[in-house]
Amino acid sequence: MSQTADAPLPEGCTTRPLTRDDLEAAFHVYSSAQLEDSGVIAVERADLEADWSRPSMRMDLDTAGVFRDDRLVGAAEVGRRGSRAEAAVHPHARDRGVGSWLAAWTEARSAALGVTSVGQTVPRGSAGQRLLEGRGYGLSHTWWVLELPPGAEIADRPLPEGYSLRTAASDADRIAVHDVIETAFGEWSDRTGETYDEWAAGVVRRPGFEPWNLRVVTYGDAVVGACFTLVDERGCGFVDQVAVAGEHRRRGLAQVLLADGFRNAREHGAVTSELSTDSRTGALDLYRRVGMRVAATWVHLVRRHSPVSR
């Protein structure tokens, strides 16, 4: 694991897979890199715990850490069965080849899993974007982080006749939510789907999950819309997922779910609220209509490769 085909490990560095004992050090690397590149820390410890708890995650194969003097200075992981990667280098360890080594490692691991491409989402204009573009990555889509400012009015959004709004209280509700979300997000041809257990690791089994985090719109007995909202370590409400079944769209249900999520986040201590969306959804104007504004822009970059021979 000490070198990859086109990026030797920098002199004085060692590498090994990450373990759960590295969580705090990995969080420090990821959060320091985000603060340097975007001015905001978007990652939480619970994000790493959830990702590392996914049934498909093989910590011994799907993660890599770069160490200098026994201190973690770079971290990477490959998920979504090889199609997605995350990597970061601590700002104090940059410009020494650590980022290039991690990028090459993610590409090799992704190819070994048999997929045709690997992608990373990085702040627009960041060192990470420049590094990946230099390695042949191209733009797949743009991500926007939108913010509901402090004190912004959360207007009441009435439900259309025949619909109800409530907490997803049962296992059956949660399975139905997963189905709605997977079906809606699966409309993007380049998205890798998730099994229920993969999804649940980041939602209902996420550290700190509370029932109010997951709300649903029903029509009769059927779950037709869902919203997953949490309050992060910064005290910011974050709408992580929102989706409406195709046959129930254009009836204002997404706005109902968003307003409900923002209101619940405030009731649980949030001053501001955020969500992210990307250019594949066409939903940017929807979020602006509920009072949100763009706070940051990220890009998802993809590099295609040939699967390794088996």
Image (cartoon, rainbow, N blue to C red):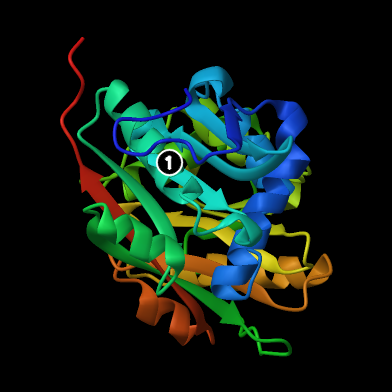
Residue 105 in view in this figure: yes
Q: Residue at x 73, y 60 (%)?
A: 232
Q: Residue at x 72, y 51 (%)?
A: 28
Q: Residue at x 61, y 55 (%)?
A: 93
Q: Point out the residue furthest to the top here.
A: 310
Q: In this view of the protein, which residue sits in the foreground, 23 or 235?
A: 23
Residue 206, percent from left and from top: 69, 39
Residue 10, percent from left and from top: 50, 41
Q: In this view of the protein, which residue sits in the foreground, 200 or 113?
A: 113
Q: Point out the residue furthest to the front here.
A: 11
Quarter of the image for residue 158 reads bottom right
- Image height of 171 relative to 250, above or below: above
Give the residue at mark 1. Answer: 101
Q: Quadrant of the C terminus?
A: top left
Quarter of the image for residue 299 reads bottom left
- Image height of 83 relative to 147, above or below: above
Q: Residue at x 60, y 58 (%)?
A: 165
Three-letter amino acid code at the position of disc 1: Trp
- Image height of 285 relative to 232, above or below: below
Q: In this view of the protein, which residue sits in the foreground, 17 or 175?
A: 17
Residue 180 in view in this figure: no
Residue 239, percent from left and from top: 58, 62
Residue 227 is left or right of residue 130, and the answer is: right
Q: In this view of the protein, which residue sits in the foreground, 20 or 54?
A: 20
Residue 154, percent from left and from top: 64, 83
Question: Element type at marker 1?
Answer: helix
Quarter of the image for residue 203 reads top right
Label 1: how many Cα within 10 Å (few below 14, some 14–19, many 20+) = many
Residue 135 is left or right of residue 253, and the answer is: left
- Image height of 56 relative to 310, above or below: below
